[in-house]
Amino acid sequence: MKFGETFTEYLHNEQQWFIENSSHVEYKRLKKVLKSCRTCKSLHVSCNDDQEAVNEQLCPCPSCPLCDQTFFSELMKEASDIAGCFSSRVRHLLHIHVATGIQKYILCVRKCFRNDRPSMLEEMRMLVEYVTMNATAIRKILKKYDKVHSSENGKNFKSKMQAEHIELLQSPWLIELGALYLNFGGLDGGQLNELSSHFSCHLNSTPPVMTLMLQDSITLNYDLTCAICLDTVFNPYALGCGHLFCKSCACSAASVMIFQGLKAAARESKCPICREAGVYGKAMRMIELDLLMKRWCKDYWNERLASERAEVLKQTKEFWDLQTKYVIGY
């Protein structure tokens, strides 16, 4: 079955209520735009006697005004909406799983009357399918664009998506979703078997990785190594650019103390990997990933915790010593 038919079938499956409330790629309409490309049609007319030339190069221009205006502006908006929808739904699941305060109390009471586990598992499955189907649709339509126009604009658009941090399969929220699944028990629960073909994690390998299996035997590996200390991330944070670091390492790179947090970093502070500025203010704590480390690598996690607490204590003492000297004047 062609992907277009598979994607159409996905949009009209039994979870249509979920899809109707979520953004998705207008794959079928974008393919029609390619077919109706005026530049390509005019070339077909002028080269009607030389079919081989038409097959080798459908469009003579590196860019097509008709396709570009429709394609890249709308596709960017769709990708942004999908990324926003995906992150908000994953965030909702995380709030339920690691609730604190009054929300935790309410959820504990509700468990006495209702089991939320099956519904959470079902939403996790739908979110995995949602992000992979739309990411595949974007990849295939851009590949089709480059094939029709003999250009690299589609490939360049992928780079632009990465720069805008809306590349679906590189989202830190996808790593959090994978960690949430693994924290639910991995293969131990029968209801999780359907997700077992998607997520796996190897924390003791070199480097430690989380693996996501997609359609067409595509495998994505997410490196869980901190690029600063070169060890498995501890108390991990994802900066606004998506790169993962230990909290203590990221604070050190931003020249702030651990107890101050990444939000205290200056706006001009740059990511140690991609050198993008302003990414510390948008940093997100990877709660589920940290919980996975705590459960699967208990000795390592406790060792790093003790080390970080000692460093926090040392930095706090130095900070208040400096404040005292400043106030009393020596």
Image: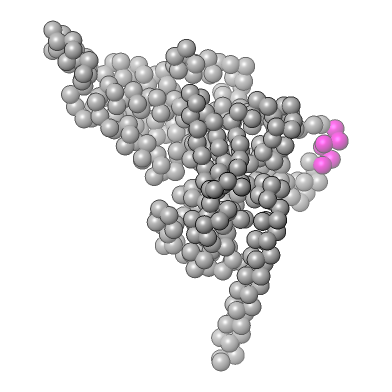
Q: Residue at x 20, y 20 (%)?
A: 57
Residue displayed at 56% across by 27% down: 129
In the current view of this chain or complex, which residue is farthest to the bottom?
330
Name the image colouring.
one colour
The residue located at (14%, 10%) in the rendering is: 50
- Residue at 27% x, 21% y is 148
For the magenta stretch, what is the residue range?
108-113
Q: Is residue 45 above or below residue 93?
A: above
Q: Quadrant of residue 27?
A: top left
User: Is 259 displayed left or right of 131 in the figure?
Assistant: right
Q: Is residue 166 magenta?
A: no
Residue 133 makes an appearance in the image? no
Q: Position of residue 134 (x, y in %)?
A: 48, 27
Q: Nearer the viewer, residue 176 or 283?
A: 176
Q: Is residue 227 visible?
A: yes
Residue 175 at what x, y percent from top left? 57, 41
Q: Residue furthest right?
A: 112
Please, is residue 292 above or below residue 152 in the view?
below
Q: Nearer the viewer, residue 248 or 229?
A: 229
Residue 325: give x, y in percent of width and height.
Answer: 58, 87
Question: Does 228 sit left or right of 69 as displayed?
Answer: right
Image label count: 0
Q: Main secondary structure of the magenta part?
A: helix
| Quadrant for the C terminus in the image | bottom right
Q: Is residue 112 magenta?
A: yes
